[in-house]
Amino acid sequence: MANVNVKFNNKDYLLSCDDGQEESLKKLTEFLDKKYSELKDKLGNIGENKLLLITTIKLIDEYFDLKQKVTNQKKKLDDISNKFKEIRSLAINYKNDKDIEINNLNQKLENFKKAIEENNSHYEAMLDKTTQSLEKIILNTESLSKIQ
């Protein structure tokens, strides 16, 4: 334990605190003394006990206001975090849906390419048959014209 000399209401006090907390204790005492002095200047000398009580109530009021603000900010942060998670989930679902749609379109494209290749093969086969038939007709026509 460490001992610290502090000044409050123009009086010196020797207080004990954990080692390493000396500066913090001095700052807290200075803050309390400042609040106390401000109220003393505002309200006059209404008695040390009453001024200490009013100072304490004022500080507790400030503490609770600050605590409420922190709670509200935490709630807002939680709300934002939940909205972010929701948006993230929607984005992931959207991406998954689009991936499925792209895969389906790719499959349809592959099927379409196969159909084109098959139709080309059929077309070429028909062209070959037609060409052969025409060649036969031409040969037959030539044979007939030679005969006549």
Image (tube, rainbow, N blue to C red):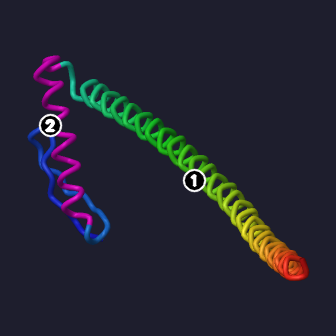
Lateral position of residue 33 relative to residue 118, left or right = left
In the rendered view, tell whether residue 93 sits above or below residue 107.
Answer: above
Residues at discs 1 and 2 in contact (Cβ within 8 Å): no
- Residue 92 image point, x, y percent: 62, 57
Residue drawn at x 14%, y 19% is 42
Lateral position of residue 85 relative to residue 106, left or right = left
In the rendered view, tell whether residue 14 sits above or below residue 60.
Answer: below
Q: Which residues are magenta?
A: 21-45
- Residue 53 image point, x, y percent: 32, 28
Q: Nearer the viewer, mark 1 or mark 2?
A: 1
Lateral position of residue 117 relative to residue 59, left or right = right
Viewer-side residue, 56 vs 104: 104
Disc 1 residue type (three-letter): Arg
Disc 2 is placed on an element classified as: helix
Lateral position of residue 7 relative to residue 95, left or right = left
Is residue 121 something one can see in this rendering?
A: no
Magenta stretch: residue 43 in it? yes
Tell me the distance, in whole angstroms, between the alpha carbons under discs 1 and 2.
Answer: 49 Å
Q: Circle 2 is placed at which residue position?
A: 34
Dot 1: within a 10 Å radius of its alpha carbon, few (fewer than 14), some, or many (20 or more) residues?
few
Dot 2: within a 10 Å radius of its alpha carbon, few (fewer than 14), some, or many (20 or more) residues?
some
Disc 2 residue type (three-letter): Lys
Residue drawn at x 18%, y 52% is 27
Residue drawn at x 22%, y 40% is 32
> The C terminus lies in which quarter of the figure?
bottom right
Q: Circle 1 is placed at which residue position?
A: 88
Viewer-side residue, 45 vs 104: 104
- Residue 13 image point, x, y percent: 17, 51
> The N terminus lies in which quarter of the figure?
bottom left
Magenta stretch: residue 85 in it? no
Q: Point out which mark residue 18 bears.
A: none
Viewer-side residue, 17 vs 65: 65
